[in-house]
Amino acid sequence: MKTTVLQKSLKEGINTVSRAVGKSTTLPVLKNILIKVKDNFLNISSTDLEMGVKWWVLTKTEKKGEITVPFSTISSFVNLLPEKNIDLQLKDNKLTINCEGYKTQINGVSSEEFPIIPEVKKDKSISINSRLFCEGLMQVIDIPSPSKVKPEISGVLFLFSGKQLKMVATDSYRLTEKTVNLENSVKSDFSFILPQRTAREIVNIFKEENKNVDIFFNSNQILFELKMDEVDHPKTQVSSKLIEGNYPDYKEIIPSKYETQVVLNKDEFLNKIKAASVFSGKINEVTLKIDTKKGELLVKSENPDLGDYNANIKAKLEGDDVSISFNYKFLLDGLNNIKSSQVLLGVNGESNPGVIKPIGKDDFLYVVMPIKNN
């Protein structure tokens, strides 16, 4: 191997693949990254056996070759180098890095020891703006909860239909649905469940991009691919296993109508829930008392050791009076992911799920289970 690459580019590539570097003690090579040079491309890869990341850049190549080196070593060194050209040379499983007064030799491990990152057959595909996709994903990404009993809810459900993508997540106590409009209609409806960790890394890797990311998938694998600007060649690929199984029929728990509706200023509601959280008890309980005659919502919390809290919010109310309690953390999670200035709170009595959604937009829905009082 003999090639020249900009420090800025090499640093970007190493940082990108860091998302999938393994921590395995039984397979130490997973702590390495694979560096390949071929046909004027430098390719860096990493995997933890569940997810893989590949990154490419155009380089001036004199000799092809490949080697794996410890991620922590090469990352620490390259980050300290000036933004100049870096010469990479491989000999006897030792990678020499030379950059304007800096020179080091890193002991590597043969690329034959590195696990093969499975190729994803491109049976089905869709293209979507990466920034729009990541912004939507960020609104649901924190909801799933690891579950050995119900592994399906450990990830995010993706439902493609017509010109819409719905992203759904739940932990059995709350559920969120985000709708993203697509440029083109899908040929047929399809769905898959993406692991939460992969979803997080997709956001970390692609959120700053503002061009289309291509998504390819089959029954158990998925690939996210971003192309280079200069040539028709991948720049970044993220592949992952999918979660197998059937996602719960989540639409069954979304109320079709509400006995009580409240329209509130989001920021005022958010701040008063935060204030109530200071005085909530061990189960994070905050009570919302809806008085339609007075046209106000009372936010209450009480802690025997600290005291109590009461605050009124003027609101537009319709329907029956009701007093309902929620975990304040769940309310805050829903409100923080709503972009509109006003929100609708819909409830059906004190023991059924409540719904929070934006006013003026129909692209986000948050369902939360109440705390049932004995």
Image: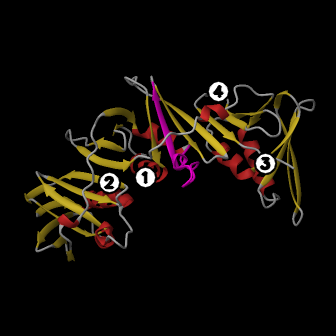
Mark 1 or 4, nearer chain start: 1
Above/below status of 68 relative to 199: below
Mark 1 or 2, nearer chain start: 2
- The residue sitting at 19% across, 71% down in the picture is 97
**Alpha carbon distance from label 1 to label 2:** 10 Å
Residue tagged 2 = 53
Q: Give the range drawn in magenta.
A: 140-161
Residue tagged 4 = 360
Check disc 2: other Cα within 10 Å, few if <14, some if 14-19, many if 20+.
Answer: many
Q: In which quarter of the image is residue 187?
A: top left
- The residue sitting at 27% across, 50% down in the picture is 118
**SS type, badge 3:** loop
Look at the image and say whether residue 75 sits in the magenta stretch.
Answer: no
Residue tagged 1 = 201
Check disc 3: other Cα within 10 Å, few if <14, some if 14-19, many if 20+.
Answer: many
Q: Are marks 3 and 2 in contact (CB under 8 Å)?
A: no
Check disc 1: other Cα within 10 Å, few if <14, some if 14-19, many if 20+.
Answer: some
- The residue sitting at 37% across, 55% down in the picture is 50
- The residue sitting at 39% across, 25% down in the picture is 186
From this viewpoint, which residue is outermost toward the left?
62
**SS type, badge 2:** strand
Query: How far across and how far down the image is residue 2, in percent?
Result: 10, 64
Say whether residue 240 is visible.
yes
Mark 3 against mark 2, which lies toward the viewer? Answer: 3
Amino acid type, label 2 = Val
Residue tagged 3 = 371
Look at the image and say whether residue 147 sits in the magenta stretch.
Answer: yes
**Alpha carbon distance from label 2 to label 4:** 39 Å
**Alpha carbon distance from label 3 to label 2:** 42 Å
Q: Which mark is residue 235?
A: none
